[in-house]
Amino acid sequence: MRQPLVAGNWKMNGSMDSVKTLAEGIKAGIDTVTTAEMAVCPPYVYIPQVASMLAGSAISYGAQDVNDQEAGAYTGEVAPGMLADIGCKYAIVGHSERRSIYGESDEFTASKFAAARKAGLIPILCVGELLEEREQGITEQVVARQLDAVINLEGIEAFGGAVIAYEPVWAIGTGKTATTDQAQEVHAFIRGKLAALDAAVADKVQILYGGSMNPGNAEQLLAMPDIDGGLIGGASLKPDDFLAIGKAANA
Ligand code: PEP
């Protein structure tokens, strides 16, 4: 039985004040979420503040990205060991905004995935197709290619210590959610692809759905057999909505 995970990606939002309000709100309501693990991924600069505010709670935290190098002359970057040092559990890698805005390749994403694991972090690997790729009927090819980059570098076993987030790019921040069938179909494809290489790993890995998940659609999506939680953008900035999604993950 896979534990549901609901992770909030706060993206480049917040200030010391707003982050305080948000973390306090989530912490105050976390007791109402009984089964699912809740995690937040604030902007790097606010992680220590959020970490100290969440101390003593069951809420985990992580980063929205990470570099693939351990240290050195990489101006502006943050190493996986630094995130581990400040207590991060998770690091998102390969978010579609990193891939599309900053041109990060499947190979670079796989390298980040490997570096995160090496530092003891749990990577949350984002995969997903663009609208035109769905329209061309190549969703599975795209997702397979993104997964293969990691499998080729790290081997299938690496997914034993990782999380996958299926995020159709056309559903991110657009208010357009994949239907439960569309999402389940791709989640089942991902699990099946991994199962062909290692059934135990495929059975264990949590596959989150991301793309305009909100309290109104979460219960239906999370009821699907291969959807093990959510990676939440917009709705994770509202404590009540984020907690409501966490509660829906218990069902
Ligand atoms: C995301 O950015 O990972 C995401 C799922 O965003 P939203 O929930 O806003 O679509």
Image (tube, rainbow, N blue to C red):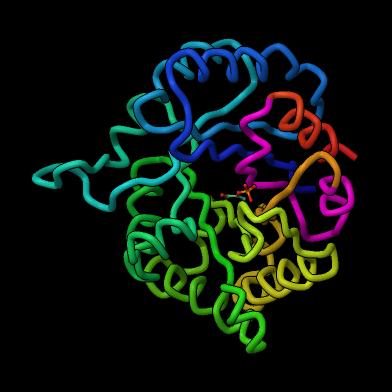
Give the residue at x 41% y 75%.
152
**Residue 147: x and y, percent?**
51, 71
**Residue 144: x and y, percent?**
56, 78
The residue at the far bottom in this view is 136
Q: Is residue 188 left or right of residue 231?
A: right
Q: Is residue 38 magenta?
A: no
* Relative height, residue 119 to residue 190 (above, below): above
Which image quadrant is residue 58 in? top right
The residue at the far left in this view is 73
Give the residue at x 71% y 75%.
189
Give the residue at x 61% y 86%.
138
Q: Is residue 186 left or right of residue 109?
A: right
Q: Is residue 151 left or right of residue 224?
A: left
* Relative height, residue 67 to residue 35 (above, below): below
**Residue 212: x and y, percent?**
70, 51
* Relative height, residue 101 to residue 132 (above, below): above
* Relative height, residue 121 to residue 221 (above, below): above
Q: Is residue 235 magenta?
A: yes
Which image quadrant is residue 109 in? bottom left
**Residue 127: x and y, percent?**
55, 65
Span highlighted in magenta in the image: 217-238
Give the residue at x 53% y 58%.
126
